[in-house]
Image (cartoon, grey):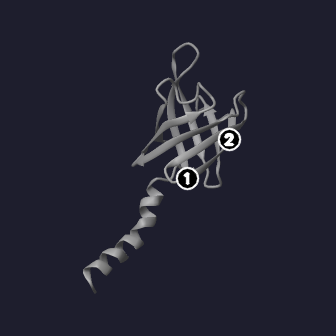
Amino acid sequence: MNPFLRFLTLTVLLSPLSLMAQSPVGSWKLPVPDGSGNMITLKVDISAEGTFTLDVGADGNIETKGKYTMDGAKMSIQETEGTECTGVGVYTIKVEGDTMTMTRISDACTDRGGPEGVMVLKKA
């Protein structure tokens, strides 16, 4: 087989693996400060169906529900229940191993993403 065709075939066969590596689907944990500055764990469960839940304190109680869409490495998120701000936030995501980094592009909810606009989540 021609080396170029071999390379092209390999690229086509492996491209789904690189797309799966960027998938946000799964359970994630994110340390966030509470109102007093103490760190608490936020557990985020992201489904393949385009929804997510937030469990503040990782105590098994779902406080917030939302939906998301993906466009390449851009994730648009919108909380639909359990919050006062239901605006859309757009973030780039990068998944490497057990870490997902979300970097704010824009967000109608000013408190989401913290002052730097970067959230680093670890697989739960």
SS at badge 1: strand
Cβ atoms at labels 2 and 1 below 8 Å apart: no
Residue 103 shown left or right of residue 43 in the figure: left
- Which numbered dot is residue 88? none
- Which numbered dot is residue 71? 1
SS at badge 2: strand
Residue 64 shown left or right of residue 114 in the figure: right
Q: Nearer the viewer, residue 8 or 35?
A: 8
Which quarter of the rendering shows the N terminus? Answer: bottom left
Going by the picture, which residue comes out furthest to the top?
36
* Disc 2 residue type (three-letter): Gly
* Disc 1 residue type (three-letter): Asp
Residue 41 shown left or right of residue 67 in the figure: left
Q: Relative to 92, is 83 above or below?
A: above
Residue 15 pos. (x, y %):
42, 66
Q: Relative to 112, is 4 above or below?
A: below
Residue 112 pos. (x, y %):
58, 29
Badge 2: residue crowd in 10 Å (few <14, some 14–19, many ≥20): some
Residue 116 shown left or right of residue 58 in the figure: left
Badge 1: residue crowd in 10 Å (few <14, some 14–19, many ≥20): few
Residue 63 pos. (x, y %):
69, 32
Alpha carbons under labels 2 and 1: distance apart: 17 Å
Task: Name the residue that disc number 2 marks.
Answer: 66
